[in-house]
Amino acid sequence: MNTHRSVQNRLKPTNWRIEQLPGISSEDQARLIDCGITTTLQLLQKCHSQEQKHALSEKLQVHIHHVSKWVALADLSRIPSVGCQYCGLLLHAGIASTAQLAQMHIHKVHQQILRLQVATMQRRDLCPSRGEIVQWIQQARLLSN
């Protein structure tokens, strides 16, 4: 258990510039920056509740669905081994939060991602390895504690 705690103390959530998150148009990036949201951590802090998400969507004049998507991407990108590279893949595979990923089993996550890759790209070889997915889940568990 000591090892678990020392690893947890060393695992820090990653924080990205808002421009690095996938799926946010340059116009929406500029609007977020005008609101003082320049990083994923700031987005998560300002949209911790549904009311805060709604307030930001009104301020930006975008549908709340967009803000919720950005928050989900920012949350998943906190996982160091996921980052901005795989947060969109996880979201499109139906995994919307670090807490949700932390509760999942490797087989289910791998199956969902593989199904998505085959359906959209028609390529099994683009699916992250089981080892990568295990690391995602382990780090999600550490960040969720």
Image (tube, rainbow, N blue to C red):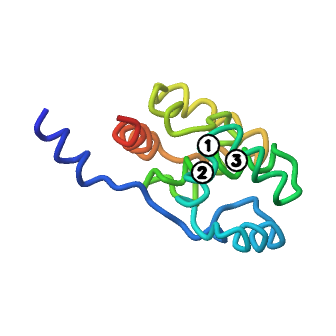
- Is 72 placed above or below 21 here? above
Query: In front of the other: label 3 or label 2?
Result: 2
Give the mark, 3 or 1, whose residue is nearer the N terminus: 1
Q: Amino acid at mark 1?
A: Leu
Provide residue 93's location: percent of width, then percent of height. Answer: 67, 37
Dot 2 falls on a residue whose secondary structure is: helix
Q: Nearer the viewer, residue 97 or 46?
A: 46
Query: In front of the other: label 3 or label 1?
Result: 1
Q: Nearer the viewer, residue 127 or 141?
A: 141
Q: How far apart in space, not on screen, are marks 3 and 1 (Cα)? A: 16 Å
Q: Nearer the viewer, residue 101 or 108?
A: 101
Label 1 sits on residue: 90
User: Dots 3 and 2: beta carbons under 8 Å?
Assistant: no
- Is 107 placed above or below 88 here? above
In the picture provided, is 9 more to the left or to the right than 15?
A: left
Provide residue 33's location: percent of width, then percent of height. Answer: 69, 72
Give the mark, 3 or 2, whose residue is nearer the N terminus: 2
Residue in the picture at 26% in, 45% down: 8
In the picture provided, is 61 more to the left or to the right than 133?
A: right
Provide residue 76's location: percent of width, then percent of height. Answer: 55, 47
Label 2 sits on residue: 87
Label 3 sits on residue: 123
- Is 36 placed above or below 79 here? below
Dot 1 falls on a residue whose secondary structure is: helix
User: Dots 2 and 1: beta carbons under 8 Å?
Assistant: yes
User: Dots 3 and 1: beta carbons under 8 Å?
Assistant: no
Residue in the picture at 84% in, 71% down: 27
In the picture provided, is 134 more to the left or to the right than 96?
A: left
User: In which quadrant of the rendered view does residue 59 lie?
Assistant: bottom right
Q: How far apart in space, not on screen, are marks 3 and 2 (Cα)? A: 19 Å
Residue in the picture at 57% in, 66% down: 39
